[in-house]
């Protein structure tokens, strides 16, 4: 590749001309399309996230990125019949790498609209065929099967951005950022997360079973590549709720838990049983199901519009239906920094959280630990903050 490549524009269309250059070797090759500024921010963050998940958990991994934070991330576990129906992929045969990406989008189906995809393993035909039907701006992967590359090159009228990452090239050990006349420099955050992060349980319940460890590693590694403040809930090998970029930690927790609640409720029988106007497209159906779940938060015009889209309307979910359903799940939660107050635990327990991982170090640690003990939640402290800005 050339010393620099022209970008469509900078962060905004009026910021032209814009370009990208490599610090040393290029970490990717452009196989199709022309990248934009935000595309490359998402691509490089997504690639490093999925590579770390792959190295840590030894499973194919994927991420769905939007505006420099993941909409979701996952490893390639098989989907249950109910989850596949919720994601509208029940008729598709999914390879492990395709399942990872389907899961990464499925954690927040509304936010993933127009995402940038990242996968840890070569893209096969299964993944390419799924991506062909989705609204997505581009993808980065370590390789592409010939049939898959041909399918993706036809997407968006031939303009779909396809990047091939160099899996052998490590990120620089130092990073810098120019900001309004300043150049800030620091070591790259590469301190690994592994099973040792569970070595300091601080609650009465100290057991972290294999699934909880797996899901907490998914959540915690995802936080490393998320705009802070951030809180992440995970279950079944995937992110199910991410609250990012908030000044208040409790608002991050509320956002993450609210998304996790919606993920759980999207699998409810009544939500799966909704029937829609035949003209409603798939993204609109996903949005309609989310509105159905969030009925009490909708304005009157929104409620009226939703009822007009649903052809078998029988009323919203009751609080008893919601609570009875989410009580059947088990989720985990990770924070990118210490919890300053127990209100984070009070909110988390209502979203079926059973295990928590956080750095610790707050003057309120005792109160937070006491709240976990009150609710029967196991919590460990890592001592490692994961801010990203």
Image (cartoon, rainbow, N blue to C red):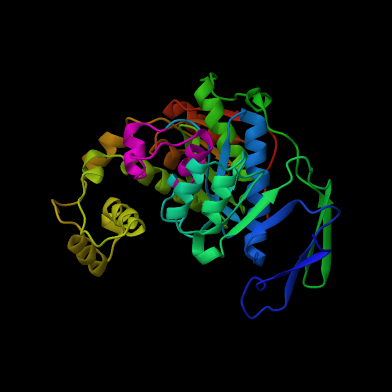
Left or right? Give the position of 55 relative to 152.
Answer: right
Q: Residue at x 59, y 48 (%)?
A: 118
Q: Which residue is at 55% across, 28% downward?
A: 214
In the image, farthest residue toward the right: 24
Residue in the foreground of this view, choosing between 154 and 40: 154
Count all numbered tags in the image, as a single digit. Answer: 0
Say if residue 338 shows up in the picture.
no
Q: Quadrant of residue 56?
A: top right
Residue found at the very far bottom of the displayed protein: 14
- Image quadrant for the C terminus? bottom right
Whether residue 95 appears in magenta in the rendering, the answer is yes
Vertically, is 237 above or below 126? above
* Residue 32 percent across, percent down from the top left: 63, 60
The picture places residue 188, in percent across and down from the top left corner, at: 79, 47
Q: Position of residue 246 (x, y in %)?
A: 55, 57
Magenta-tinted stretch: 79-105
51 or 127, which is in the foreground?
Answer: 127
Is residue 99 positioned above or below 6 on the image? above
- Whether 74 is drawn above or below 302: the answer is above
Residue 385 visible to the viewer = yes
Kindly identify the residue that appears in the image at 64 percent across and 66 percent down.
36
Q: Residue at x 46, y 59 (%)?
A: 135
- Residue 85 found in image quarter: top left
For the N terminus, the image quarter is bottom right
Q: Position of residue 22 (x, y in %)?
A: 81, 58
Does the magenta-highlighted stretch encompass residue 160? no
């Amino acid at each position: 590749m050339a010393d620099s490549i022209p970008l469509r524009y900078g962060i905004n269309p009026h910021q032209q001309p814009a370009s990208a250059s490599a610090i040393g070797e290029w970490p990717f090759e452009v196989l199709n399309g022309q990248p934009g500024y935000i595309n490359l921010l998402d691509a490089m963050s997504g690639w490093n996230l999925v590579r770390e998940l792959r190295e840590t958990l030894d499973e194919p991994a994927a991420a769905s990125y939007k505006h420099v934070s993941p909409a979701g991330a996952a490893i390639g576990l098989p989907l249950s019949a109910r989850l596949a129906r919720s994601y509208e992929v029940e008729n598709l045969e999914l390879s492990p790498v395709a399942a990872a990406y389907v899961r990464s989008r499925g954690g927040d189906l509304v936010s993933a609209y127009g995402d940038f995809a990242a996968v840890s393993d070569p893209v096969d035909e299964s993944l390419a065929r799924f991506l062909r039907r989705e609204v997505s701006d581009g993808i980065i992967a370590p390789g592409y099967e010939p049939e898959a590359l041909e399918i993706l090159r036809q997407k968006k009228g031939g303009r779909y951005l396809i990047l091939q990452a160099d899996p052998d090239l490590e990120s620089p050990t130092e990073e810098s950022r120019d900001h309004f006349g300043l150049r800030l420099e620091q070591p790259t955050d590469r301190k690994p997360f592994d099973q040792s992060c569970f070595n300091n349980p601080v609650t009465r319940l100290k057991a972290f079973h294999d699934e909880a460890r797996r899901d907490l590693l998914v959540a915690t590694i995802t936080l490393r590549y998320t705009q802070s403040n951030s809180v992440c809930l995970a279950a079944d090998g995937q992110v199910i709720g991410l609250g990012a970029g908030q000044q208040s930690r409790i608002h991050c927790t509320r956002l993450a838990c609210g998304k996790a609640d919606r993920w759980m409720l999207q699998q409810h029988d009544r939500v799966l049983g909704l029937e829609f106007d035949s003209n409603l497209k798939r993204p609109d159906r996903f949005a309609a199901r989310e509105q159905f779940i969030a009925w009490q938060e909708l304005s009157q015009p929104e409620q009226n519009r939703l009822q007009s889209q649903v052809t078998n309307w029988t009323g919203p979910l009751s609080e008893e239906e919601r609570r009875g359903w989410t009580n059947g799940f088990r989720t985990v939660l990770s924070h990118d920094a210490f919890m300053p107050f127990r209100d984070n635990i009070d909110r988390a327990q209502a979203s079926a959280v059973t295990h928590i991982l956080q750095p610790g170090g707050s003057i309120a640690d005792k109160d937070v630990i006491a709240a976990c003990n009150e609710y029967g939640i196991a919590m460990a402290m890592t001592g490692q903050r994961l801010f990203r800005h």
